[in-house]
Image (cartoon, rainbow, N blue to C red):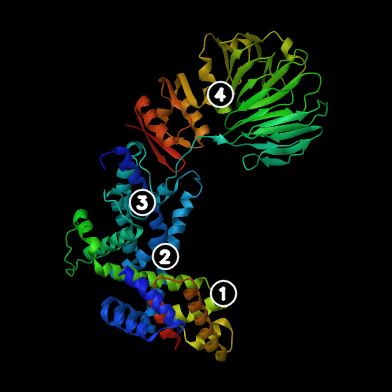
Amino acid sequence: MTDPQETKSHQKRKHEMLSELYDSYYGMLLFYTKQLVRNAEVAKDIISEVFASMLKLSHDFQSVADAQAYLLVSCRNRAYNYLGAAHTTRSSTSLSAISDDWATDDTIHEEMVRLELLRTIYKEINALPTYARDILNLSFIKGLSNQEIAEELQKPVGNIRALKAQALKLLRLRIIEKKLTYTLLLLMLEEVAH
Amino acid sequence: MKDDVADWHDLILKYLKEDLTAAEQLRVDELYRQSPSFKKLSDEFSDPVLLQSRLLQFDLAMQEWAAVRETERTPVAPVRTMNRRSRWIWAAAAISAASIVMYMYLVNPAERQMSPPTAQQQAILPASQKAVLILADQHTIELDDLRKGVVAQEGETVIEKSGDGALSYQGKESTAALLNTLRTPRGGFYHVTLSDGTKVWLNAASSLRYPVSFGTAERRVLLTGQAYFEVAHDAKRPFRVVVNEQSQVEVLGTHFDISAYLDDNETKTTLLEGSVRVSPVPVSGVSSPLLSPGHIILQPGQQARFLVGQMTQQGIVVNKNVDTEAAISWMKGSFSYDKASFALVVRQLERWYDVDFVLPKHLAALPDRYTGDFQSSIPLSELLPQLSQITGLSFQLEGKKVIVRSK
């Protein structure tokens, strides 16, 4: 790391990784941070600060997953700071203190799986054919009743149940086909389909 | 945990396909018991109410993210050369005032001194190859959008755009009086080879009007703004440049630059090679102005200047041994100033970068003269600090305006 050339290329790699993450992970971070602070604007500010502070950090991330974990921990810490809550032992905002313990944080890994599951479901729903996407959007995401869905889609109520089951089956098939790593999703779909 | 997940994946796939052996079924049950995380997540995602509310929140977050993206994109989109990295740094800066400060420390300390970028500030890039071609039938063609190849055909002449973006006229010389106009916007320049082989480099905010084919008598073109000419020698057909429809330069195979921006209030003809005759007589009649007694003949290295509206022979000032390279520096990627007024420098930068300088009156009339060089291929944000050093004034970029203040 003493070689300035090498340091520079590390920096460059990190910048590229952060740039990718900004595009691919911002939405997830926003969802996560908003759950904690209950305010979209505050959450956005926190995310910006975290990205900006990561640039300054000399730490080199081994993988995208490591960087994601760091992002989540940083957002959480800043969210707790914002809330002024004592329910974190990481009261210090020192970057080094945070970066030392983030890698061993099991609850963050659980959080990453949780987010990944949500993203997968969300993504797969939106990749479905229009009719299935619409029906799952209304039922699964917006939480409308069969009656409301029938009105929205201008279809007989009697059809909605069957359409829903069909759409869920399709979603399941897609997920099996893609051999997604996150198997909990499959379990969950089993439950919901019944 | 990750390995575990991969393991579960296989098991669950089999489970779903109802392909699970009894032993595997036991393993699933075992894993379920052993991993508190697995159990917790599994329970959460099996709860339709919880899942639905989370998906709803997730959907909202994605829409908000899309909105953030949109606001980032709007100010940034026109700057195509901005790289990926700076785009998101920029975006991060746009969202939060706090991170603007950080951004400036991290990315470009030099830029910070001169032009603290506001969230909306986009990079102001130097002039690029841009022009509009107006054909004889008034049809217009945006040249910068075009790929290389034939652009149009006028009479017997084919107009082509070459690989480096220059325009050329090729074909039999005929007498058809079809006039084309090449016009550059502010922040644009262009290069054209006329049908006789004469090469013209047109500076920003200028226009050149010329016949697609010159015919057998004289070669005559009309210029507003600034252009550098390399005229193909042809003693039988004198080459004439009519400037702002008011004065005329006649040449016989020569290299020269004419700067005749109306807002500069002055026409400058600088000769590098050959011989030109500058005729200050209005040429509205175009009978034989060259025979009028009022003309001046320039030698290489000389520059004729006269104020617009004072085109008598007495009005012409001839400077000998001028820095001819300075006159055509714009073509070669730099601005060279030789005792130039601040106002002149400002107007040139305005045209080249397509910006407007906002300056108090007392600064506009500064009597100081400046001599120096700038690179003209750098973004404005890099040039302004240099200008600040030379002039002792402060320059601040706000959108497409440059606010000038005394320090």
Q: Which numbered circle lies on residue A129?
A: 1
Q: Which residue carries the number 4 mark?
A: B265
Q: Is residue A114 visible?
A: no
Where does residue B308 sit, x and y in percent of width and height?
A: 59, 21
Q: Dot 2: within a 10 Å radius of its alpha carbon, few (fewer than 14), some, or many (20 or more) residues? A: some
Q: Choose the circle earlier in sequence order: 3 or 2.
A: 2
- Does the CB distance between marks 4 and 1 fall below 8 Å? no
Q: Which residue carries the number 3 mark?
A: B93
Q: Dot 4: within a 10 Å radius of its alpha carbon, few (fewer than 14), some, or many (20 or more) residues? A: few
Q: Label 4 is placed on what type of residue? A: Asn
Chain ID at mark 3: B
Label 3: which secondary element: helix
In space, the residues marked 2 and 1 are separated at their CA atoms by 24 Å
Would you identify the image quadrant in which residue B382 lies? top left
Q: Which residue carries the number 2 mark?
A: B64
In space, the residues marked 1 and 3 are separated at their CA atoms by 38 Å
Chain ID at mark 4: B
State the residue at coordinates (62%, 40%): B144
Q: Label 1 is placed on what type of residue? A: Pro
